[in-house]
Amino acid sequence: MTVLITGASKGIGAATAKRFAMAGINVAVHYRSSHEEANDVARICLEYGVKVLTIAADLRSMEQIKRMRDKLEQHDMLPDILVNNAGIAHYGMLTDMTEQDFDDVIATNLKSVFLCTQVFMPHMINQRYGRIINVSSIWGITGASCEVLYSASKGGINAFTKALAKELAPSGVTVNAIAPGVVRTEMIAHLEPAEIESLEEEIPAGRIAEPDEIASMVYFLALPESGYMTGQVVSPNGGFLT
C-alpha cells in the first residue's frame, strides 16, 4: 500500500506523511521547492521501516505531474491513496488583487487537485480500490473576508470532491475532503501573538489545532473500513463552525 501526499514537506502534509509511515504504509513525499524539509520528513518516515520516495514537481503543470507518475511507477509506488494537500494562502482585499494573483491561487490550490486526481485515479479504478482525500479549509465552506481567492479555491475543492465521489463510487474509490479550521502551520505564521490569542478566544475548543490532529483525520478516511464514506467534507474546527 502506498500513499502520495502533495505538499508534504511541511505542516499538515508532513504530519500526514509521518502518520501513514507509522501505520506501515509506503510514502511518496511530494514537494515543489522545499528540498531539505522534504528530505527531513523522508528520514523520519524511513525510521518506521517503510519505503519512502521524495519527488519534486510543480503541480500546476500536467507534464511535471506525468513525470512524477512515471517515477513512482518505476519504483513500484503508484499510489493507492492520494492526499491532495498542496496549497498556498493569499490575503488582501479583492479590489487589490490582480489577475496573476487569481491564476496563482486557483492553479496551485484547485487546478493541482484536478490534475493530480486525473493522473493517478486510473490506477485506482483499474484495481477497483482507492482513496482520494482533498485538504480543503473551513473557509471553503463559510468564506473568509480578505481571503476571497483562497476561499473560492477551497470551495471549488469541496464541490469537486462531492461530484467526483459520485463518479468513482462504482469503482470502489472514495473521494472525501477535510476542511480544517485554524491549524498551527506556516499559513498563520504571519499573525501576531495577540491575533492568535483573539482567534483562540473565538474557537469554542479554546485552542488552535495541531497538524497531527488533521493528519489523523486524513488517515481515518484512508482506512479500508472507511469505504462507505464518500463525497463528504469533514471539518475539524474545534466548534468554530457547526
Image (cartoon, rainbow, N blue to C red):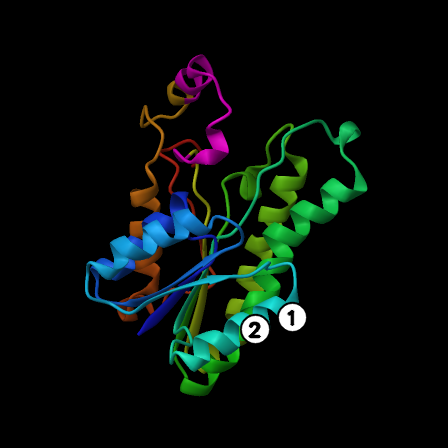
Q: Residues at badges 1 and 2 in contact (C-beta under 8 Å)?
A: yes
Asked if residue 19 can be seen in this view, the reply is no
The spot of residue 81 in percent (x, y) is: 39, 68
> Is 191 a magenta residue?
yes
Local SS, label 1: helix
Residue 12 rendering spot, x and y as whole percentages: 39, 46
Q: Residue at x 67, y 40 (%)?
A: 149
Residue shown at the point (59%, 56%) measured from the top left: 159
Q: Over which residues does the magenta segment extend?
A: 183-199
Cα–Cα span, label 1 and label 2: 6 Å
Position of residue 136 relative to residue 125, above or below, is above
Q: Is residue 140 left or right of residue 240?
A: right
Q: Which residue is mark 2?
A: 67
The residue identified by callout 1 is 63
Quarter of the rendering occupied by the N terminus: bottom left
Task: Report x, y in % for residue 16.
Answer: 34, 53
